[in-house]
Image: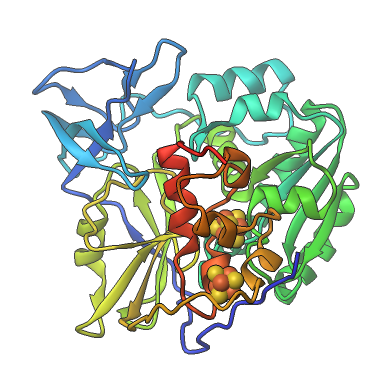
Amino acid sequence: MQEVTIKKDNKIKLDTIFHSSLNPKFIFLPIKKGYDLLVEDNDYVYKNDKVLVSPLGSNIYSSISGRVLGIKEMTYFNGSTTTSLVIENDFKENIRKRCGARKYINNYTKEEFFDTLKKVSLHYKGNDTVSKIKKIESSFIVNCVELEPYFGNKYFILKKHIEEVLETIDLIDKITGNNKVLFVIKNNESELINELMNILGTYPNIELKLINDAYPNGRDEVLKKYFKLDLAQVIDVEEIYNIYEILKRGKPVTEKFITITGNAVNPSCIIKVKMGSLLSEIFTSHFDFTSKNVDVYINGLLGGELVHTLKYVVDSNIDGILIMEHTEIEKEACINCGICSKCCPMGLNPKYVFDHEGRVKPIYYEKCLQCGLCNYVCPSNIDLKSCMKGCRKNEKGIE
Ligand code: SF4
Ligand code: SF4
């Protein structure tokens, strides 16, 4: 696989000031298949109340206090339109029972650790974090590499909460049986590297691993391949920080960091938002377009999607919005240069799939990460990524 460094616009810089948008008028919580509603119209809910539960015990919590208005069809970034519970914010942040914060987290026993996480049913990007931790064998990877160019959620978490993150990794390590922990960050984050070098001496099992600032090195599958640890579990640094918050304060995860940046938006920053907020409300309350004609990408230019609305509900699948001045992209005929397959991190041949669309076996596309690197390198601007996605949707490959 040929490594690709993304050419960045040096004018795009993230604010160092931290922003938050924690007062949405309404929140929307998806009533997924099999989930039971625990509240009725007009009920009053407190912040952090459990409002939906699945038969397997996965819970969904309210990120605000306020009144249940009913249900409404809402759109989520994973492409689904889902009936959702609507709660109107009373802006009081009322909490039923304030849990005392625990002074240290390093004295959790294994039983207490899993019980505490189970109670709040921690899920991250569709995966059950507890199951992942239980599967840890001899090593695990902590992924601190941004998924997309210009995004800074992970960098921000480390800058602000490095001690908390390391303390949590150390506890997971102790609970899962003293493993080798690979703590992976980009090799150009010199300030963070220096800071880590000074602290890591007290955590002998945590090994700092540096990786090039190349795309898509932030993907879990790419890290596993890079470090030749195909069976290792990969835990995201945001997931680690969420675990810390649960163990320390006993509260469910109801907030999320997202990056809003680009060359056509002001400000350009990391912002903390409530789960269930509408992206459009966050945007209109805090941001402005600086150009009349913009392209908006949720989750980035390469692995994300170009969208025409921001009426999406925030969940853990949204990492950021990139807003760029509009550029016309002209598609041309394939020149058979082969660069798309040379660069694919999964060793796929997207050009072959493009040429045989609808007639290829799943083995040709099922491992596709939808990272968009093939689109980025293609000199003819062919949309290979959508073609790979289309195959998966249609599942009618026969060749
Ligand atoms: S989008 Fe899929 S086919 Fe294209 S480079 Fe990424 S993994 Fe390979
Ligand atoms: S990179 Fe583009 S032009 Fe080159 S082989 Fe692939 S599809 Fe064709």
Relative to residue 169, is residue 58 drawn left or right? left
Identity of the residue drawn at 45% across and 14% down: 57
User: In the rendering, at what x and y percent does residue 146 appear?
Assistant: 59, 62
| Apparent side of residue 368 relative to residue 31 in the rendered image (left or right) | right
Residue 78 locus on image (x, y percent): 37, 44
Q: How is the image coloured?
A: rainbow
Q: How many numbered markers are drawn?
A: 0
Which quadrant: the N terminus?
bottom right
The C terminus lies in quadrant: top right
Q: List the single residue furthest toward the top.
A: 55
Farthest bottom residue in view? 11
Ligand 2 located in image quadrant: bottom right
The x, y position of residue 95, in whole percent, is 31, 31
Image quadrant assignment for residue 116: top right
Residue 194 shown left or right of residue 121 in the figure = right
* Residue at (63, 59) in percent of width and height: 158
146 is higher (above) or lower (below) than 116: below
Q: Camera-side residue: 185 or 300?
A: 300
Q: Residue at x 78, y 26 (%)?
A: 175
Classify 347 as above or below 263: above
Q: Height in image: 301 above or below 123?
A: below
Q: Is residue 239 visible?
A: yes
Above or below: residue 144 compared with residue 396: below
Q: Nearer the viewer, residue 65 or 303?
A: 303
Q: Position of residue 337 (x, y in %)?
A: 64, 77
Q: In front: 146, or 176?
A: 146
Residue 157 in sight in this render: no
| Residue at (47, 42) in percent of width and height | 392
Q: Tell me: 142 left or right of 316.
A: right
Decide which of 130, 322 is in the foreground and name it. Answer: 322
